[in-house]
Image (spheres, grey):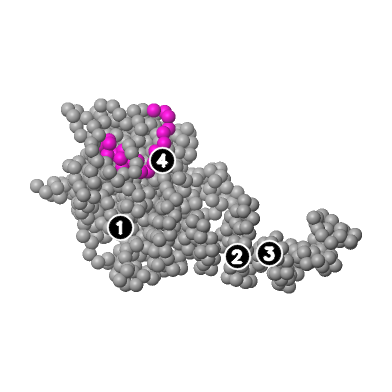
Amino acid sequence: MSRRHSLLPAVAAFGLGLIALSSPLAAQAKKPAGGALRPKVIFVGWDGADWHLLDRLMNEGRLPNLSALVTNGRTWELASFQPMASPLVWNTMVTGRTPVDHGVADFQELDPKTRQRFPISGRSRKVPAIWNLASAKGLKVGVVGFWATWPAEKVNGFFISDRAAPVLFDPRLLVNSQALTWPEGLADGVRIILKREWDPPYEEIGKTLRVSRAEFDASVKAGHDLEDPITGYRKILAATRVHAKVALDLYERERPDLTMVYFQGTDEIGHVAGRFVAPKLPQVGDGEYRKFKDAVEAIYVDSDRILGLFRAKAGRDGATLVLGSDHGFKWGTDRPAFYSGVQFDTAFLWHREQGALAAEGPAIIPSRVRGKASVFDLAPTLCRLLGLPPDPKFEGKPVAGLGGAALPRAVAPVSWEKTVKVERLVVHDMNETEKRAAEEFTKKLIALGYLTGSEAAAVDARPADRAGTETAGHYQNLATFLRSRHKYEESLGLYRKALEVNPKATTAWMNYSIALFQVDRWAESDDALIKAIQLGYNDPEAAAYRRVSTYMQRIERRPVVRKDLIRYLRSLVAAFPTNDRYGASLGKALFEDQQCAESQAFFSKIVSRKPSDVEALNLMALTSLCLQKPAEAQAWFRKSLAIDPNQPAVREASVQLERGGSSVR
């Protein structure tokens, strides 16, 4: 009998009814009977989970199940990498390979024919994942919700793609999506759960958010989704529970050897409501703080409840339970001072490079000492726990602390790409519903700060014969990953590819500028920086002056670098001739280089536009002194003091000039 037909009874039952998640059976931790059984692993992914928050909540008694896992197992701080974008890092975790190798490098991909943006899919992944290897080796697997897993993959077990209960999609648009699950009939059960769980009522939301029913109804009607803390919290809670119910029910029916379940809400709730977490930030109003301060903790408490259900099943079945995250999150006073949905790049500013890893089970040696590991170590660790061959191209290794009689013997590495064929369901041309879903996905990325509106609207600028699925973000993220590993020359080529796709990508120009500067191609770097600012880079003056600061630091070591600073400032002023701050900076640099006549010309222009600019008046005086015109300098100092008498140094200089001095110390 085929694998597909053997699952039909389970599919039918799955569609008709669900196991109660708090059933007595799930609460019993029975050891498996019989002789030697294949090792089992349950992996639970909490996106963005961070020990700073988890430790605090455990100390407060809010996460009893995680506390039990930690007490009976061991933990590691899990190092991530740049850029900390979920599709990149999670696919590294499940493949053991770098983003350059596995190919999932952005939130979106392009249709080469239509050039339309679509959410990142499994078709961008170029190498097998751990579940593909396990399935090929005869293990039964169950996968729910991981990034870039649509179209669903054909495995020995069940597979629920990331289009089921997604935080960044509208599931009502995806209810009839193609290739949602494997076996395909499981999609009916998923739809039943979605319908039942997707719209939590006010009575449920009001347990956490201190909002009135009128506020709740107004938010739901407005439909601002993740941009509104009320509807954002509601959606995240629903998605968390849908994934949990799907995974727990299918686990109970199929009892996989490897189960992998992903929860995105533990990260997204930080972007939606992280600014309301205690301690209260100064820019958060008292009313907002009171309403939403418990939203983040409530999602983690509910996630802990779900973890307890998986933990009970792991204990009953003799499985090793592993909990991991792709990166950490900023929960303290290091939080950005602005809401993540306001402007581009703010989402990434909330991430910390240290995530969390914890494990408990028959092959885990308990320890209270927190170790250190990397996201590259997860796939090798799962291989070791399951007795599967690692890939020789892994750069990670199994974490310390594995052992005992239950740990399978290590096996020789094999090439996963040569050993395993990844087979996905066939998807026909995108229908209108899926195109609408793609548009909604783009809006969510903009709302959370992962994408700018201009970049979302950009059309692939490559000629038709060079069009591909890669976005500008794809190449840019790969380049940034390589740059973070000091592979600057390699990164430059990828940044240029990003700019070929979208010549107006401001962040690509900015990152290209940084990479050029790091290989001492300063003039090219300055031109790229100015191009980014001209195209509308976020916070342009801060970007411009970071470069000035870098040059000033180098001037302290090598005074000859001042000529490079002046060259940069000349280019900046030429690009923005009406920006008086840039003009003043160039004027100061020229004054310090004793190019006094040209320096004074810049300050003269500023004073003509802003006659009350005290700094410009004082610099007119100083350049006059440099040009040996003390009387003229005295006149400028007097004008400055008339506007602001409280300038002791300027007053002292003026007194010296009155006494016949011709220079100012």
Amino acid carrying label 3: it is: Leu
Mark 2 is on which residue type? Arg
What amino acid does circle 1 point to? Ser
Q: Residues within 10 Å of mark 1 (few under 14, many from 20)?
A: some
Give the mark nearest the N terminus, 3 or 2.
2
Tell me the residue at 58%/55% (across/down): 550
**Label 3 vs label 2: CA separation?**
10 Å
Camera-side residue: 90 or 191?
90
The residue to which callout 4 is attached is 78
| Callout count | 4
Mark 1 and mark 4 lie on one chain; the one further toward the N terminus is 4
Real-space CA distance between mark 1 and mark 4, rounded to the nearest whole angstrom: 25 Å
- Image location (x, y in percent) of residue 563: 62, 62
Q: Helix, strand, or loop for circle 2?
A: helix
Dot 1 or dot 3, earlier in sequence: 1
Q: Nearer the viewer, mark 4 or mark 2?
A: 2
Residue 612, quarter of picture: bottom right
Q: Does the magenta stretch include residue 528?
A: no
Which residue in the structure is indicated by mark 3? Answer: 590
Tag 3, which secondary structure?
Answer: helix
- Alpha carbon separation for disc pair 4 and 2: 44 Å
Residue depth check, mark 1 versus mark 3: number of the one nearer the observer: 3
Q: Distance between the residues labelled 2 and 1?
A: 43 Å
* Residue 581 percent location from the top left of the image: 65, 64
Q: Find residue 245 and report its horizontal and vertical position in percent.
A: 30, 45
Q: Name the residue under label 1.
A: 124
What residue do we see at 54% from left, 54% from top? 338
Q: Which residue lies furthest to the left in this view?
A: 1
Give, as a single range, the part of the protein colored magenta.
367-386
Question: In terms of sequence position, does the residue under pointer 4 or pointer 2 come before the other?
Answer: 4
Q: Residue 567 carries which label?
A: 2
